Image (cartoon, grey):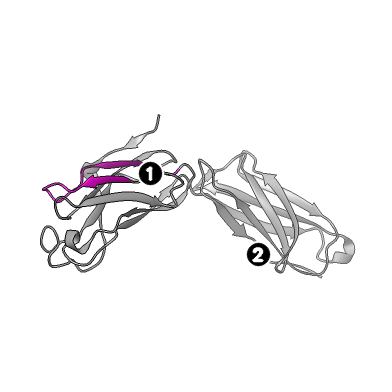
Amino acid sequence: MKKTIFGLAAVAALAIGSVAPALAYPAGQAPTLSLSSVSRLTPGDNVSVVVSRVKRDCSVSVSWTGGQGVDPVSSTVKSSGKTSVMTLATPSTAGVYTLTTSSISSACSGNSAVTLTRSITVGKLASIVAKLSTTSGYVSKSPTVTVSGTVKSGSVAVANKVVTITLKRGATEVASTTATTNGSGVFTKPISQSFTAGDYTAVISFAANSTFAAKSQTTAILKLR
């Protein structure tokens, strides 16, 4: 069952624009997008949204930009100048998404048309720290190049995470492989092949899933002579 995140009593209003339109509803105040707590949202959770300071009987809808099939929800503004509480699910894949209203017309906003937005992180964010090392800096000695690093979410190690490793010489891809983090979030992958002299980097990445947003990190340059 999907978890609904309420708590509109402690809602934080996001006002778009630094200058409020003179004829807004109520007078002198710009429309706002308010939502329930968005901390620790996981894919599939519900978020509750209210749009305020809009003319009575106007209709407002809310949706996700790139929301992966999550249907928008709509509400008609009440005499209080607010919509009813609109509840919509977060996208099914972790990532950073934009919650956005439909365009609120000038007649409904009291001035020029406006669209309200809010950037929200769904799922966990992870960081990658990685480096390249080599058994020799000289290609004549047939070196083994090792890519190693750590994946963490905050201070917590991310275990059993498959990362894709792309080894490059300049802009040219010379090897592609994968590695899996251990219980401490650490991965190590040796690459043994014929190398030519040049500057090497490795791109370590993983795709978004139901827990973590996508991430990509490039190592510092390793020089082989």
Q: Nearer the viewer, residue 10 or 122?
A: 122
Q: Nearer the viewer, residue 3 or 40?
A: 3
In the image, what residue type sits under mark 2?
Answer: Ala
Residue furthest to the top: 1
Residue wearing tag 1: 71
In the image, what residue type sits under mark 1?
Answer: Asp
Callouts 1 and 2 close, C-beta under 8 Å: no
Question: CA gap, disc 1 to disc 2?
Answer: 43 Å
- 10 Å crowding of disc 1: few (<14), some (14-19), many (20+): few
Dot 1 or dot 2, earlier in sequence: 1
Q: Where is residue 182? Give x, y as percent.
A: 65, 40
- 10 Å crowding of disc 2: few (<14), some (14-19), many (20+): some
Q: Is residue 79 magenta?
A: yes
Q: Quadrant of the N terminus?
A: top left
28 over 214 or under it: above or below: below
Residue wearing tag 2: 220
Q: Secondary structure at mark 1?
A: loop
Q: Quadrant of the C terminus?
A: bottom right
Residue pictured at 20% horizontal, 69% vertical: 19
Q: Nearer the viewer, mark 1 or mark 2?
A: 1
Q: Secondary structure at mark 2?
A: loop
